[in-house]
């Protein structure tokens, strides 16, 4: 046993070769895993961008309207001040729009070329400049879904022909669709917008954050800094960990039973969605918060106690600021999960068709993921690209939230 | 085992027992901390000297299982009495820890934090004066006066420890407890702290736990030797180091164990 180790023996060299080979294998497998996930991510983003980009644009047709010779009875003078809305509401603008289209393109489909919401643009044009009522005007209005698809190279033969005719006339254009970003859900894909769902998500997240963040952080602080270590706190800890792992649909049922049936809160409202998602997000914040608080060095607590700081001062002057970056990271993970959540919101009725953006947390609303789910289920083919566009909006929202979290984290992070 | 001094001692401990759960860490310790002098606690690791030090400003309260028996007084007042406010007690009995632990804030904020929470300064000018005085007394002013807004954690280890001393004296304590304040420092930084302890003596009653025999001999006037949770010997430092009564003290001081 006392002979010196023979570092040059064949067995030793083989062992060294095996060790290097194992290291190379591990690195290759790791690299492969990263590349695979990067490829999936790139595939997802590229498909979404390619499909979704068209969802942000729409085809518009220049509709010639001869107002003096139309059936419209509307005096430009009345479309001013407080009476404007009433005057516009009383006029048959939809009829005029239909007749104008029928007159302009009798051979290729007339009014069927236009979106159901085309008359809204005519009304907007009149409100913008009542003087056009005195003569002939050309107003860009959204095209029907068929024409829109044809413009994007995906329409029926009949629509393709109509589109070709319009194009020859120079009466079509592809425009960035402000309506998509400012409108709410609609049955017609050409006028359907994402703002309603976006605002619903925003309000829901706001309720979730306002409830889950303070409750989660205070729970974490109490459990870490004040609670005695005994069987009860162990039980609470296990329960919170389990709560974080409960499937989200269960939280939806809980929200349905408690918030809607027992407390009679309004159905489909962001307040209920926010409450339900807060139940789901809070355990995540508690767990992340406790870990962050645990990682604050005890010497800092000693230092503060040693010069006569009270427990509350130790916690709020020293522990919480140092733990905040970790707590924020946990919060944003929880919020991102809540933002993408569909199942529990279906249970509390946020899947309704809502054609107006919510004005407050008690108004009926839908949220981005549910809107995506609903649109992906639609029969009309025009909703395919709207679905992709909505996904892009959801991803952008997520990125924005994460960016904000990283900014806040770096802002509060302490350099040791 | 209690030596009488001419003036009343700043702090007294009588028959103190400390338990961690079922385990007894300190058994029947009686000792005086005199004003105008430095008392050194020496003894092998785990002998309870740090535990005893922490009973003097009730830092052991933060450990749930810790229990203290006996009487400890500050100016004749029982610090474990129900009427004693622990927050004020810790301002009056300051503490410097083994590892320098400045707050991750600016040098100024480190010193100003204590006076601020106790409301000792009426305005910015007064606070500036307290910060400067504390840093001067801690012998750090000349080194940091131009970079008060810099982080306290950016200082060297020795400077950090002096910053912690400045932080402790900023709240104008009567007693300063030091728990092995030099164990994480190099010899030069250690020498500076020892010099500082000399200068602080007279203004504050100081108790220092140390593993370093020479340090105890250099800085203290009274020395207490702890072993296995008991106070073995307590007396004037020269006496303890030259003619100890107990063989255990002699063996420890001469490096036979510890």
Image (cartoon, rainbow, N blue to C red):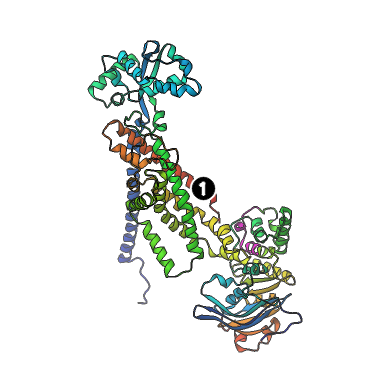
| Residue picked out by circle 1 | A408
Residue at 43% x, 19% y is A126
* Quadrant the C terminus of chain A occupies: bottom right
Question: Is residue A19 depicted above or below B221 in this figure?
Answer: above
- Counting from the top left corner in percent of width and height, residue B35 is at 73, 75
Name the quadrant of the N terminus of chain A: bottom left
- Chain letter of mark 1 equals A
Residue A295 image position (x, y, % from top left):
49, 61
Mostly what secondary structure, the magenta segment? helix
Element at label 1 = helix
Q: Can residue B253 be seen in the rendering of this structure? A: no
- Magenta-colored stretch includes residue A107: no
In screen coordinates, is B223 left or right of A252? right
- Closer to us: A381 or A333: A381
Residue B242 in picture, x, y percent from top left: 68, 85
B161 is within the stretch colored magenta: yes
Q: Is residue A142 left or right of residue B131?
A: left
Name the spot of residue A309 as percent of width and height, x first.
61, 63
- Left or right: residue A402 compared with residue B253: left
- Kindly identify the residue that appears in the image at 30 percent across and 30 percent down: A382
- In the depicted structure, whether residue A192 falls above or below residue A70: below
Magenta-highlighted residues? B149-164
Q: Is residue A247 visible?
A: yes
């Amino acid at each position: 046993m006392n002979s010196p180790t023979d570092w040059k023996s064949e067995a030793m060299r083989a062992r060294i070769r095996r060790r290097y080979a194992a290291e190379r294998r591990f690195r290759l497998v790791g690299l492969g895993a990263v590349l695979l996930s990067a490829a999936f991510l790139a595939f997802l983003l590229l498909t979404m961008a390619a499909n979704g980009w068209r969802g942000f644009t729409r085809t518009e047709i220049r509709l010639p309207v001869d107002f003096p010779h139309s059936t419209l009875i509307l005096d430009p003078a009345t479309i001013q001040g407080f009476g404007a809305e009433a005057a516009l509401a009383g006029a048959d603008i939809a009829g005029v729009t239909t007749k104008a289209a029928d007159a302009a393109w009798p051979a290729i489909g007339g009014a069927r070329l236009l979106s159901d919401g085309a008359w809204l643009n005519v009304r907007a044009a009149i409100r913008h400049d009542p003087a056009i009522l005195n003569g002939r005007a050309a107003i860009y209005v959204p095209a029907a879904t068929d024409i829109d698809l044809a413009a994007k190279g995906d329409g029926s033969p009949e629509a393709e022909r109509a589109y070709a005719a319009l194009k020859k006339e120079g009466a079509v254009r592809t425009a960035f669709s402000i309506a998509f970003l400012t409108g709410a859900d609609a049955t017609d894909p050409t006028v359907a917008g994402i703002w309603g769902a976006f605002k619903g998500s925003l309000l829901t997240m706001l309720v979730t954050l306002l409830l889950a963040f303070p409750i989660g952080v205070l729970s974490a602080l109490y459990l870490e800094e004040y609670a005695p270590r005994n069987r009860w706190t162990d039980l609470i800890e296990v329960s919170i960990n389990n709560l974080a792992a409960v499937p989200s649909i269960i939280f939806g049922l809980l929200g349905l039973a408690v918030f809607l049936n027992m407390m009679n809160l309004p159905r489909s409202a962001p307040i209920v969605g926010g409450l339900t998602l807060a139940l789901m997000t809070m355990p995540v914040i508690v767990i992340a918060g406790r870990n962050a608080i645990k990682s604050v060095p005890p010497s800092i607590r000693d230092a503060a106690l040693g010069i006569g700081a009270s427990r509350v001062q130790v916690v709020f002057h020293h522990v919480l600021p140092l733990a905040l970056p970790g707590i924020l990271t946990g919060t944003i993970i929880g919020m991102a999960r809540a933002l993408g959540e569909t199942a529990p919101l279906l249970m509390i009725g946020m899947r309704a068709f809502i054609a107006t953006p919510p004005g407050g947390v008690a108004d009926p609303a839908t949220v981005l993921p549910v809107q995506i789910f609903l649109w992906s289920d639609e029969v009309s083919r025009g909703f395919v690209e709207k679905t992709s566009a909505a996904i892009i909006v959801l991803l952008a929202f997520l990125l924005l939230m994460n960016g904000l979290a990283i900014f806040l984290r770096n802002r509060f992070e302490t350099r040791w | 085992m209690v030596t009488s001094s001419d003036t009343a001692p700043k702090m007294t401990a009588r028959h103190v027992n400390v338990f961690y759960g079922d385990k007894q860490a300190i058994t029947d310790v009686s000792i005086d901390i005199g004003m105008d002098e430095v008392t050194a606690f020496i003894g092998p690791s785990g002998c309870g000297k740090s535990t005893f030090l922490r009973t003097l400003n009730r830092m052991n309260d933060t450990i749930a299982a810790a229990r203290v028996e006996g009487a400890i007084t500050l100016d004749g007042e029982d610090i474990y009495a129900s009427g004693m406010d622990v927050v004020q007690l810790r301002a009056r009995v300051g503490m410097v820890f083994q590892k320098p632990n400045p707050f991750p804030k600016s040098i100024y904020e480190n010193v100003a934090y204590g006076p601020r929470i106790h409301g000792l300064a009426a305005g910015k000018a007064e606070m500036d004066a307290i910060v400067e005085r504390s840093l001067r007394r801690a012998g750090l002013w000349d080194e940091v006066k131009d970079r008060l807004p810099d982080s306290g954690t950016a200082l060297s280890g020795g400077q950090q420890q002096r910053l912690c001393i400045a932080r402790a004296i900023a709240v104008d304590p009567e007693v300063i407890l030091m728990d092995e304040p030099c164990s994480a420092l190099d010899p030069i930084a250690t020498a500076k702290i020892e010099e500082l302890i000399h200068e602080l003596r007279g203004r504050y009653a100081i108790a220092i736990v140390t593993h370093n025999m020479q340090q105890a001999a250099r800085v203290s006037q009274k020395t207490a030797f702890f072993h296995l949770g008991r106070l073995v010997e307590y007396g004037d430092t020269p006496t303890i180091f030259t003619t100890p009564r107990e063989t255990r003290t002699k063996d420890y001081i001469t490096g036979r164990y510890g």
